[in-house]
Amino acid sequence: MLHSRGPLLTIDVSDQSTTATDIEPISRRYVGGRGVGTRLAHERIPFDADPFGPENRLVFTTGPMQVSNMSFTGRMNCTSLSPLTDGLLSSNAGGFMSRNFADTGYGAVELTGASDELVVVHIRDDEVEFESVPELEGATVPETTSYLESEREITVDQTAVVGPAGENRVRFASIMTSEERAFGRGGLGAVLGSKNVKAVTFGGESTPDVEIPATQMEIHREAATDDHIMKRQGTVSVMDLANEMEGLPSYYFSERQFEGADGINGAAVEEKKYKKGTCSACAFACKLPTRDEESGVETEGPEFEVAMAFGSNSGIDDIVDVMKSNELCDRYGLDAISAGNTVAAYLAAEDEFGNEELIHDLVEKIALREGVGDDLAEGIDRVHADLGVENWSVKGMDFAAHEGRILHGQGLSYAVANRGADHMYATFYSVEYPLVPEDEALEPTGTVGKAERLVRRENLMAFNDAGIVCKFSRDYMSPERYEALFGVPFDELLAVGDRIVTLERHFNNQRGFDRSDDVLPYELPDFDRALDEYYDARGWHDGVVPDETLSDVDETIAA
């Protein structure tokens, strides 16, 4: 099976020591990316660790496809114990860093410990350097990347940076790369900040020698020549469909349609798009560099989730206001989905929907933990009671835009996903809108009978994160193409995904997670029965991985 190559580099920032470890057996079994990251984290992070403690580890990984020239492969993975969900979590970022990471020759890089001083860790194929940077305390993401470029000649595409939000341990702080791409959901920026690491940089000339089959160029050509709406409007292209289906969360989830959707939809974003945007080696170019000439606001996006969180969910119908919120989140290093939803919760509590000046002020206050921002920085799950609003989260993570009250299989997916109410864990919404061919689509209503399909999609998405292959490649990938690229039957690739999901769940079980955490703040038809079907399909008992299932997944861990 095609898999990533190279040792694990462990960096203890407490004493600035480094160790290289052979992980070839793990790479062969878990391929790379989220797979290798999950397996290493499961083994090396104590089950009782504090997400902000020095014992927590942050594992950067990429996959074998990052040495290819294929579209949909410019992505990286980061795995750690999340301060937002309190469980094991992987986050995935696009951009251009993955190939710079591959150039180091390492298959995985983990950071542990905590530095006494603020540092930048420079990782090259021949050395690791620790640079003391007290002058960067409180610096924004652009200020940090500007410093690295001017003082060290390190480009933004080589950097993983935290802004003030990460330093201040905002529970939904992001790690930013290429300035505007994020390891977003779950607060991994706060983990890096807790280690007193301002940035990590990657580079070298030791790219592993991995032979990628010629199928990569077929996919690349199709991505380059296809006239796909996402090339013009990105993910926000689905907003009109969601709104028509009464599936667009609005006014802090109290409504499901937004009368101002035309002001923040795909057409509104396309009007502000001024050039093509892409990730490394990708001809699909679905990113959204946007600019408003009148106000001077320039950002990348917003994507659908952000247009919901800072738009419809906050009562905002002007795309420029949403662009400004998006730009602020990138500048300060915040997950824009969680930031927008948390701001929306405050707006609901204060009856201030539509107040764009307050929204932008709150984003800054959250990042700096000033005033009410200090409370909001804890996230909806921890602050909703004080605000007097409903808790729109699962396992501590607030909801994405795809509405589970309309797309019932997606609702089930939110409930069972190991990292909470995240849409990308299974992308089940795609088969219920649907965004897939008719013969692959499911009716959006009902939960019973969808569990096996949900398990299969979770496994495939987990494998994509191991590969690493972008999930927006769905119109260009097929079982046959996966087999041609990775060299084994498709079911073996799904089995890799199953191992990843099961290890995540087992780790979380050791921290007390069980069926009582697989819940929703709303009712779905036959939900308990569907939950039982899901556990049966996974071989779990009431949300807990039994010893025999763990043994099937990984005998070494079970022993």
Image (tube, rainbow, N blue to C red):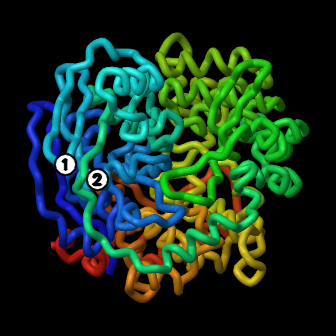
Nearest the viewer among 407 and 28 is: 28
Task: Categorize mark 2 by other alpha carbons within 10 Å: few (<14), some (14-19), many (20+).
Answer: many
Q: In this rendering, would 302 be left or right of 20?
A: right
x, y (%) of residue 514?
A: 42, 59
| Tag 2 and tag 1, C-beta contact below 8 Å | yes
Q: In this rendering, would 132 be left or right of 264?
A: left
State the CA–CA distance, disc 2 to disc 1.
Answer: 7 Å
Nearest the viewer among 230 and 344 is: 230
Q: Find numbered disc 2 in the image and state the secondary structure of the residue it sits on.
A: loop
Which of the image's four quarters has the C terminus? bottom left
x, y (%) of residue 43?
A: 20, 58
Under mark 2, the amino acid is Asp
Q: Find numbered disc 1 in the image and state the secondary structure of the residue it sits on.
A: loop
Task: Identify the mark nearer the N-term, 2 or 1.
Answer: 2
Q: In this rendering, would 351 be left or right of 460?
A: right
- The residue that mark 1 highlights is 125
Q: From the viewer's perspective, is residue 19 above or below residue 251?
A: below
Can the viewer see residue 124 in this picture? yes
Nearest the viewer among 536 and 203 is: 203
Q: From the viewer's perspective, is residue 553 above or below residue 73?
A: below
Residue at x 37% of width, y 53% of height? 99
- The residue that mark 2 highlights is 103
Under mark 1, the amino acid is Asp
x, y (%) of residue 381?
A: 53, 37
Task: Categorize mark 1 by other alpha carbons within 10 Å: few (<14), some (14-19), many (20+).
Answer: some
Residue at x 32% of width, y 80% of height? 1
